[in-house]
Image (cartoon, rainbow, N blue to C red):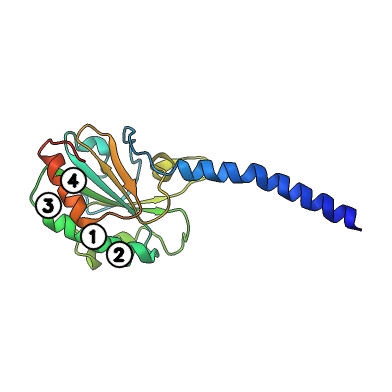
Amino acid sequence: MKTPRILLKAVLIAALATLVPALRAQEIQKGIEGKKAPLLNVSDWYQLPEGKDRVEITDYPDKIVVLFFFQHWCKASQEREFPVLKKLVDHYKGNDGIVFIAVQTAFEGFFDNTPDKLRVAAEKFELPIPFGHYTKVPGFPGVSGTYKPGGTPWWVIIDRKGMVEYNGFILNEEEAIKGFDKMIAGLPVD
């Protein structure tokens, strides 16, 4: 009876040996820093600019675009990063060189992360910015497939030329303000 167990163990080890490099490759591919920002292709929106039925990255030429990806049920989004977003939006109120957009990427928790939660988040954090909702559709990459967020919360900063300058789970408010001020002034960011 030891032979089948040894064989099974060998098969499992071989399977893991091929799986681990694939998982590592996926970790490396999180985000798209250094690449041209793709279209959002989000159809459900709340709080759009007047006269718009959707927003797209191309609507903001020569502006810095800050994307905040979240899920309503994500504790880190709600407790840590939405407050950072609120402070940044307030800090840059009236500055037309920078735009903030929040997108709920419902890749899990489809019954909790619904389009009606856009209004809930906008009102809770008093954010007068566009909020989009994207539900993952099998076979179609959508915003999650094109921006490759590592989960939520996830920040993407797009420069005036449409290139992704930063993507990651956490945005340090003070460092972000320093960087945004340089970007707005047309200076390089360290």
Q: How many marks?
A: 4
Q: Residue furthest left?
A: 94
The image position of residue 5, as x and y in percent, is 84, 56
Residue at 37 percent of width and 66 percent of height: 75
> Which residue type does callout 1 highlight?
Val
Q: Nearer the viewer, residue 20 or 30?
A: 20
Q: CA distance from mark 1 to mark 3?
A: 12 Å
> Which residue type does callout 3 highlight?
Tyr
Q: Is residue 46 visible?
A: yes
Q: CA distance from mark 4 to mark 1?
A: 15 Å
Q: Nearer the viewer, residue 154 or 144?
A: 154
Q: CA distance from mark 4 to mark 3?
A: 13 Å
Judging from the image, what secondary structure is the residue with disc 4 in? Answer: helix
Residue at 19 percent of width and 64 percent of height: 126
Q: Earlier in the sequence, mark 4 or mark 1?
A: 1
Q: Earlier in the sequence, mark 1 or mark 3?
A: 1
> Which residue type does callout 2 highlight?
Arg
Residue carrying label 4: 179
> Which residue type does callout 4 highlight?
Gly
Residue at 45 percent of width and 40 percent of height: 29
Confirm or deny contact between disc 1 and disc 2 (CB under 8 A).
yes
Residue carrying label 1: 84
The numbered disc on residue 92 is 3
Q: Residue furthest right?
A: 1
